[in-house]
Amino acid sequence: MAETTYKTERDRIVEASETVIHHFGFEKTTMNDIAKAIRKGKSSLYHYFTSKEQIFAAVLRKEVADLRGEFLKVIDAEPTPEGKIRAYILTRMQIFRSKLDRHMSFIEATAERYELLMRMHQEYDPQEIRIVSAILADGVQRGSFDIDDIEATAAALVSALKSFEYPFDRAADAAATERNVDSMLKMLFYGIVPR
């Protein structure tokens, strides 16, 4: 019971913090702002988190978990494996850019924060590989794809997707990103060697 209450309260703090941080930005948000949002004293936050950075890391983890649901909705809406891959990649790029814009002040502040973001990204890699593997396996089952090693192909695709993220190019427009994604998918689906 006590463990459930602890987790419930911690989740409530993360939820409120997400709203407060998105409203004020990470740098301007204080522990007092977060405490006010949950109607508790600032000292009560330290029972659950040691710092504002630790709260923000929990907010980022929550956002990553929420993304999985968004991705699955987009994938389920597409009738073909090719459409599922394309929708997944474009949605991933759109969401990544929006999160990047929202959290850039946090990321740019210190190398440690950038490393935190990279570690969190790596934590999500296995989930992302599972999502892409499921799409590829469906494509193989339907006869749309001919893949010898689905997991290795999914890992390679997830790795390739990261090239659209770094360096952080916030100036790239959605149309250019979509053209780049379509070029990558054309190469994935049809190869570069004439047949």
Image: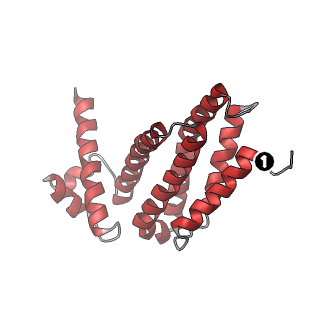
The 10 Å Cα crowd at callout 1, few under 14, some 14 to 19, many 20 or more, is few
**Left or right placement of residue 46 versus residue 140 in this view:** left
Residue 21, percent from left and from top: 30, 62
Residue at position x 58%, y 63% in the image: 177
Relative to 148, residue 44 above or below: below
Q: Which residue is mark 1?
A: 191
Residue 162, percent from left and from top: 62, 55
Q: Amino acid at mark 1?
A: Gly
Relative to 2, residue 73 above or below: below
Residue toward you, 90 or 27: 90
Residue at position x 24%, y 53% in the image: 16
Quadrant (top left, top right, bottom left, bottom right) of the N terminus:
top left
Residue at position x 86%, y 49% in the image: 194
Residue toward you, 106 or 131: 131
Quadrant in the rendering for residue 95: bottom left
Quadrant (top left, top right, bottom left, bottom right) of the C terminus:
top right
Residue 143, percent from left and from top: 68, 29
Residue 165 at least partly seen: no
